[in-house]
Amino acid sequence: PGLLVDVATNRLTQRASSPRAFAGRVGLATAIDILLTRPHQAVVRETARRIGAAPSTVSTAMKSLRNEGLMDERGAVDLEALFWATAREWDPQWVPVGRYPHPDGPMRNPALKLGFDDVREPGWALGGDVAAAHLGAPIGLASGAAPDLYLPSRQAHRLACSILGEARETAAPAARLAVAPVVAVCEDRVDVAATRDEHWLIARPLFVALDLAQDPGRGAEILRSWDPDPRSVRVW
């Protein structure tokens, strides 16, 4: 039963024997680690130690980067090309919530892992446009804009969405929550409370830049004009 259609087609050439760059969490975590540390030469064992992965898996991820032309045989990396390749794979799953997550009351549950006590430990991290504005990016931001918040675990995300309730489709969300694509998003966060009216700790500029890069027009224009730390190498 069925119909067999026998026609000539143009065959797409594929490198079937080569793993796709960024395949799996380790691939993405490897790329992120290289962008954060900006080594002259990426070393498998050092990267594996920092991201907590098996050296063999990281070696496979780096082979993928070489196959994509993002890394040479010596481990030297084209950082700007790697950033934009990573941006194409950056896909946090945002959930709009109906109530703002004020860090008190029901939100004081330790299972939510807010992480206000230590900026280095995993905790909630502010990303997106609001974070970009706080970090000095040339971005227009409406008053009362809903924050984008990365959470360090799926369990914390489920609990937070349960407490705050998902926003109705017709209503503007009070905030958007997503599980961090890699744990590094929620580590070594930036505290701007001394200079800005912001109680949330902010994700490092790399992750905010990846958020901005999701808009190929407006985001790319903002990134061209944004250099959050003139003392270090910008990777976009």
Image (tube, helix red, strand yellow):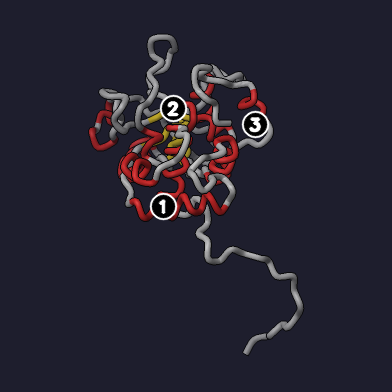
User: Quick check: 62 above or below 96?
Assistant: below
Residue placed most toward the observer, 45 or 142 = 45
Q: Earlier in the sequence, mark 2 or mark 1?
A: 1
User: Which residue is the extreme one toward the front?
Assistant: 74
Q: Secondary structure at mark 1?
A: helix
Residue 45 relative to residue 174: left or right: left
**How many other residues sit within 10 Å of disc 3, few (<14), some (14-19) or many (≥20)?**
some
In the rendered image, which residue does mark 3 sit on? 220
Residue 9 relative to residue 54: left or right: right
Image quarter where the C terminus lies is top right
Q: Secondary structure at mark 3?
A: helix
**Picture coordinates of residue 34, whole percent (x, y):** 45, 38
Q: Nearer the viewer, mark 3 or mark 1?
A: 1
Give the residue type at disc 1. Ser
**How many other residues sit within 10 Å of disc 1, few (<14), some (14-19) or many (≥20)?**
some
In the rendered image, which residue does mark 2 sit on? 204
User: Quick check: 178 above or below 199?
Assistant: below
In the rendered image, which residue does mark 1 sit on? 59
Q: Nearer the viewer, mark 2 or mark 1?
A: 1
Q: Earlier in the sequence, mark 3 or mark 2?
A: 2
Q: Earlier in the sequence, mark 3 or mark 1?
A: 1
**Picture coordinates of residue 89, whole percent (x, y):** 54, 46
Give the residue type at disc 2. Arg
**Picture coordinates of residue 187, whole percent (x, y):** 35, 31
* Residue 181: quarter of image: top left
| Residue under the image location 40 percent in, 43 percent down | 43
Residue 132 relative to residue 51: left or right: right
User: Quick check: 6 above or below 34?
Assistant: below
* Residue 157: quarter of image: top left
